[in-house]
Amino acid sequence: MLQDTATTELKYKLFIEKTAASKLVWALKSKNGWANSHSNDSEDVDVIPFWSDRAYAKACARDDWKGYLPVEIPLAEFLENWCMEMADNEVLAGINWDANMFGKENTALALAVDILEQLNSINSAISFKNYSSINEFITEISESLD
């Protein structure tokens, strides 16, 4: 189990670094909508999986998600729209899941803060519609986490 935790944490860190650098997040979509699942911890909790790379997403387009295609989501849109809406609906984010649907699950706001802090640390320029800066966005999320 310790190895599994280490692996999921490493894949999570990779997700944060790669999405901040590429400014893209990947998800799977079909004509019926976006790929989603239940949490590994509770059938009552929904999870939407995201990947840092098109190939990782494509590798998961099998079994229940056969026919789904990788779709890129611009990072600013992901942070402002997806993460905020998922938080409002109490939906978790599945991060860089493998083909066995194994990977870290995190709250959308915690994920957003991790990405925003990474953007800050690499001095990345990113434009938001609703926030004037990365720090303003972090402050607003942090206040809602309290």
Image (cartoon, rainbow, N blue to C red):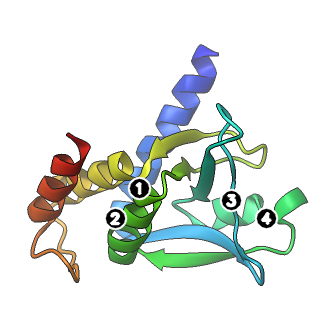
Of residues 134 and 56, which is closer to you in this image? 134
Question: What residue type is disc 1 on?
Answer: Ala
Which of the 4 image quadrants contains residue 70? bottom right
Of residues 119 and 143, which is closer to you in this image? 143
Could you tell me how far apart the alpha carbons at marks 1 and 2 are, in whole angstroms? 24 Å
Residue beneath the point at 39% across and 70% down: 22
**Residue mark closest to the camera, 4 vs 3:** 3
- Determine the secondary structure under disc 2: helix
Could you tell me how far apart the alpha carbons at marks 2 and 3 are, in whole angstroms? 25 Å
**Residue mark closest to the camera, 4 vs 2:** 4
Residue tagged by mark 1? 87
Nearer-N-terminus badge (1/2): 2
Residue 137, visible in the rendered structure: yes
Q: In which quarter of the image is the C terminus?
A: top left
**Residue mark closest to the camera, 1 vs 4:** 1
Which of the 4 image quadrants contains residue 57? bottom right
Nearer-N-terminus badge (1/4): 4
**Residue mark closest to the camera, 1 vs 3:** 1
Could you tell me how far apart the alpha carbons at marks 4 and 3 are, in whole angstroms? 12 Å
Q: How many residues crowd around disc 3 within 10 Å: few (fewer than 14), some, or many (20 or more)?
A: many
Residue beneath the point at 25% across and 52% down: 118
Residue 62, visible in the rendered structure: no
Residue tagged by mark 3? 36
Q: Are marks 4 and 3 in contact (CB under 8 Å)?
A: no
Question: What residue type is disc 2 on?
Answer: Ala
Residue tagged by mark 2? 21
Could you tell me how far apart the alpha carbons at marks 1 and 3 are, in whole angstroms? 15 Å
**Residue mark closest to the camera, 2 vs 3:** 3
Could you tell me how far apart the alpha carbons at marks 1 and 4 are, in whole angstroms? 25 Å
Residue tagged by mark 4? 61
